[in-house]
Image (spheres, rainbow, N blue to C red):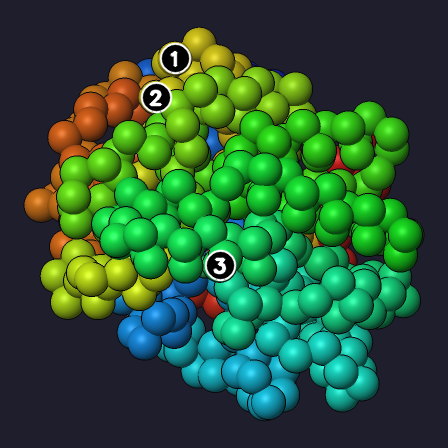
């Protein structure tokens, strides 16, 4: 199958140009002006006039079917990658989970089973490490070799995913040897639990107090601590879902002194705030960790993206229905499963708030949603690029079309939207995954099982300049 995309503006992290593109099979074969005039025939031509052609977006932080708080995140690999595709995201990297007392292998096999034959777009895995011991440390080397080179550890969630500093440092020492990357959920979970227990004892059980208990300073402290541990081990570290100015200050200081510290933020921290949690139990819709912050943190995060203190925007997509799932915590915010839906909306929110809002150039928008995650997570230039030989994961993107976000029209399998009623400018018209059109003008044209496991290489920190 050969497809021509004509008359579009190709936007990459490096720049923009008017050019056509020929896709042959699963990859990009030619880029140039008037390819049809130059005699290049195709089975199908997509006219991208007035629109951008961008590399398919990459979301390196999703949780399909994550077990949390006695329930499971609702999207499967089928519904989740389908929703992602509607929003212009053609690759996700999801977190496989090691159950305490079991092997990493068992956890990884379980995640392969969830995804294989179901995903409609490509996917990779990181590994959540719940136990650090001689056996799991040895297993890390095997996973790196199998294309799962990143390991998430937590200074939060005591009794669930929490690791102490010694365990984190041992895992970092191992990645110093095997080239893997440690991803850190950096909040001081022990201190948070003390504050949360005090609030509940005082009768403050509403969802809003989830946001109150998790002080920004607890995120700043843990961010500094894990970066310092990584510096001591001589390895890069990646901070996930950075939400607070306090953490950004620590990250910036570390990068200024030359530390190999990288981080993502998420749309919820750029667009939502602690005020959204104030509406009684409705606030449970916004319970995630780290929590939403006071609104004055938002502009600092945008500035972090502009200045490359923050390299990536991912979603931390972890959807729980309001009815029946978030409701598990009606009497105590600590029992509300943590996580928000978002995989479908990231690209448009960032275009609207970033490019249309005058904060990001369109090239930087492409960089934070696609190219930087591809580089940091060992997929570049197969993914995250518009280049001859790259996978034809492409989005024909209309920067002028507006749409209104709503649970009534979204494709995520969850009964609410955090952005209900918000109008955004910019939308994906045609989405291709390895040369196949999987979404066209609001219709799904892909199939479960099209998505393939992407065996990734180790983090290409050198490319992050
Ligand atoms: O609230 C969140 N972020 N839920 C997903 C688990 C995690 O910590 O990433
Ligand atoms: Zn986390
Ligand atoms: Zn997460």
Please identify the quadrant where the C terminus is shown.
top right
Instruction: Determine the residue positioned at 51% across, 64% down.
Output: 157
378 in relation to 449, above or below? above
Q: Nearer the viewer, residue 281 or 376?
A: 281
Badge 3 density bin: few <14, some 14–19, many ≥20, Cα 10 Å: some
388 in relation to 210, above or below? above
x and y percentages locating residue 443 in the rendered image? 18, 48
Badge 2 density bin: few <14, some 14–19, many ≥20, Cα 10 Å: many
Q: Is residue 302 left or right of residue 257?
A: left
x and y percentages locating residue 34 in the rendered image? 48, 22
Residue 133 visible, this angle: yes
Give the Cα distance between marks 1 and 3: 38 Å
Q: For residue 220, which quarter of the picture? A: top right
The tag on residue 357 is 1
Contact (Cβ within 8 Å) of mark 2 with mark 3: no
Mark 1 or mark 3: name the one nearer the start of the chain.
3
Badge 1 density bin: few <14, some 14–19, many ≥20, Cα 10 Å: few
Mark 2 or mark 3: name the one nearer the start of the chain.
3
Instruction: Determine the residue positioned at 53% across, 74% down.
Output: 159
Contact (Cβ within 8 Å) of mark 1 with mark 2: yes
Contact (Cβ within 8 Å) of mark 1 with mark 3: no
Q: Is mark 3 within 8 Å of ligand 1?
A: no
User: Which secondary structure, mark 2?
Assistant: helix
Q: Label 2, on which residue?
A: 352
Q: Quadrant of ligand 1?
A: bottom left
Q: Nearer the viewer, mark 1 or mark 3?
A: 3
User: Which secondary structure, mark 1?
Assistant: loop
């Amino acid at each position: 199958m050969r497809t021509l995309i004509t008359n579009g503006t190709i936007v990459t992290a490096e720049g923009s140009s008017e050019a056509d593109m020929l896709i042959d099979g699963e990859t990009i074969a030619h880029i140039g002006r008037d390819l049809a005039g130059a005699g290049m025939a195709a089975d199908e031509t997509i006219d991208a006039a007035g629109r951008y052609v961008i590399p398919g977006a990459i979301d390196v932080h999703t949780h399909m079917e994550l077990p949390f708080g006695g329930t499971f995140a609702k999207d499967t690999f089928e519904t989740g990658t389908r929703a992602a595709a509607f929003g212009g995201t053609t690759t996700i990297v999801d977190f496989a989970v090691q159950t305490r007392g079991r092997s990493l292998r068992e956890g990884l096999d379980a995640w392969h089973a969830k995804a294989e034959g179901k995903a409609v777009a490509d996917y990779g895995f990181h590994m959540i490490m719940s136990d650090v011991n001689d056996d799991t440390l040895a297993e890390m080397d095997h996973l790196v070799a199998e294309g799962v080179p990143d390991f998430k550890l937590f200074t939060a969630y005591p009794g669930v995913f929490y690791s102490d500093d010694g365990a984190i440092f041992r895992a970092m020492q191992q990645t110093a040897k095997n080239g893997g990357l440690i991803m850190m959920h950096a909040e001081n979970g022990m201190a948070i639990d003390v504050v949360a227990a005090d609030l509940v004892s005082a009768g403050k059980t509403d969802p809003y107090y989830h946001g109150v208990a998790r002080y920004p300073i607890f995120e700043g402290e843990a961010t500094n601590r894990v970066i310092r541990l990584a510096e001591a081990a001589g390895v890069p570290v990646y901070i996930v879902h950075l939400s607070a100015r306090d953490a950004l200050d620590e990250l910036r200081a570390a990068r200024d002194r030359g530390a190999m510290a990288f981080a993502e933020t998420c749309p919820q921290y750029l667009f939502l705030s602690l005020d959204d949690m104030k509406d009684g139990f409705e606030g449970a819709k916004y319970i995630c960790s780290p929590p939403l912050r006071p609104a004055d943190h938002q502009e600092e995060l945008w500035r972090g993206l502009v200045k490359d203190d923050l390299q990536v925007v991912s979603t931390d997509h972890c959807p729980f229905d309001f009815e029946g799932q978030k409701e598990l915590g009606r009497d105590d915010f600590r029992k509300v499963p943590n996580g928000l839906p978002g995989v479908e909306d990231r690209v448009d929110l960032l275009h609207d708030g970033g490019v249309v809002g005058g904060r990001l150039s369109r090239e930087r928008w492409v960089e934070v949603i696609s190219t930087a995650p591809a580089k940091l997570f060992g997929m570049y230039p197969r993914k995250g690029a518009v280049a001859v030989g790259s996978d034809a994961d492409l989005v024909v993107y209309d920067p002028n079309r507006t749409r209104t976000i709503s649970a009534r029209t979204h494709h995520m399998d969850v009964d609410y939207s955090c952005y209900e009623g918000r109008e955004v400018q910019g939308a994906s018209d045609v989405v291709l995954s390895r040369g196949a059109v999987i979404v066209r003008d609001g219709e799904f044209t892909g199939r479960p099982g099209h998505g393939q496991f992407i065996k990734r290489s180790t983090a290409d920190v050198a490319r992050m300049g």
